[in-house]
Amino acid sequence: MIGPRRPSLTSRAVASCCRRWVRPRIDRVRLEGTQLRSLRAAVRVGGVVAGWPGMATIEPVRTSRFSGEWVRTRRARPTGAVLYLHGGGYVASSPRAYRCVTEPYSRLTRLPVLAVAYRRAPEHPYPAALDDALAAYEWLLDQGHRPERIALAGDSAGGHLAIGLLTTLAQPNRPMPAAATLFSPLLDPTLTDAIRRDAVRPDPVMTPTFAARCAAAFHPAGDFADPRLSPLTADLALLRRFPPIQTHVGGTECFAGDSERLHERLDQAGVANRLFMARGQVHSYVTLNRVVPEARLAVRRAAIFVRSAMGEVRPGRALR
C-alpha cells in the first residue's frame, strides 16, 4: 500500500540532504577500526539529538543472558510489554539511540517498552543478536507477562531480527507474541532485489554495498539459507504460526521490495498483515518522528495496531 499524499516538505528536505551528504559517505565506511568507531559515535549522537528532550523513565535491565532498558512513559501500564529491537545494521546503535522511537511508542501503546541491547557485529557475529533477543523474550515470559500481552517491534536490522525471532519461536511451536511491527526491515541479506531497485532509483540513505558489508560482518560464513536469516524463503507452514504483522517502509528505500515479498508470503500463509509504504520516505524514517509527520503517523498506526491485537481498541482502527 502506498499512501496517496504528496510527501511533506520536511521529508523531502530530509531525502534531499541524505542524497547529498549521507549516501556518498556511507558507501566508503569500513566496519573496522577507526571508521567503525566513528560510525557508532555518529549514530549515537544522532540518536541522542533525535530523542531530546526525553520525558520517559529509563530503567536499566541486566541479566545473565541479555541487557537492555525499560522505557516507561507516564501513561504506560504494567499489563503487558513491547519488546523493541533497534536498527543499525547489526553493527551500530543502541537502545539509548532509539529512545526517539521507544518513548513515543510507550506513550501511544500505553505499555512499557523493553529495548534490547543485543550484542553487535563484527565482535559478536550471528547468532549472538538472535540469542539475546530470544533471551529477552523468554525473560518477559518468566517475569509473568503472558505472550498475548507482549508485542514485538523492530526497525531496519532490528526488523530482520524480529522476524528471525518469530521464526525461531515458530519452529519448536513456542508461544508467540500478540503482534509484530516492522519499520524499514531488511529481510533479504542476499540483497538481490535491493541491488536491482537501487540501480534503477538510488536509495537516498542506504546502499546495497554498505548493507552487504553489514551482512558480512553479521554472518561471515555468508550462508543465508536458514529461514531465521532469510525469512522470505521460510515454508508457509512456518509462517502460518506468525502473529499479525504490520510493516512501515519508505517509498525511496532499496529494501522496499523485501517488505512487499514478505506480505505476499504472509497473505499466502493466511496471516493477518498490512503493509504501509510511505511516499518519499527514507530508510528508518520512523526515527525522525519528532520532525517528519509521516513518521509520527507510522508510530500512531503501529500503536493502534498493537492495542488492537491486545483487544484494547476496535480492530478496524488498527489498519487505517
Image: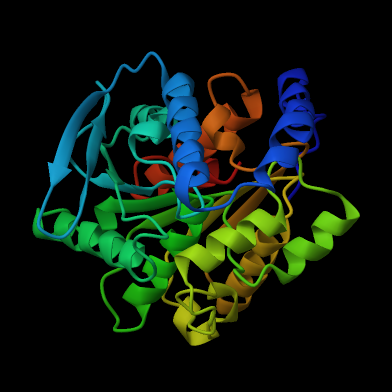
Depth check, front residue: 103 or 198: 198
In the current view of this chain or complex, which residue is farthest to the top?
53
**Which quadrant: the C terminus?**
top right
Instruction: From the top left corner, tell me how far across and down residue 143 is, in percent.
Output: 9, 53
Residue 224 vertical position relative to residue 5 in the rendered view, above or below: below
Residue 249 vertical position relative to residue 292 in the rendered view, above or below: below
Residue 143 as seen in the image, left or right of residue 212: left
Depth check, front residue: 36 or 153: 36
Instruction: From the top left corner, tell me how far across and down residue 56 is, in percent.
Output: 28, 22
**Residue at 49% across, 79% down:** 221
Residue 227 as seen in the image, left or right of residue 267: left
In this orientation, does residue 255 appear?
A: no
**Residue at 19% across, 55% down:** 66
Q: Tell me where residue 283 sits by quadrant.
A: top right
**Residue at 11% across, 52% down:** 63
In the current view of this chain or complex, which residue is farthest to the right?
200
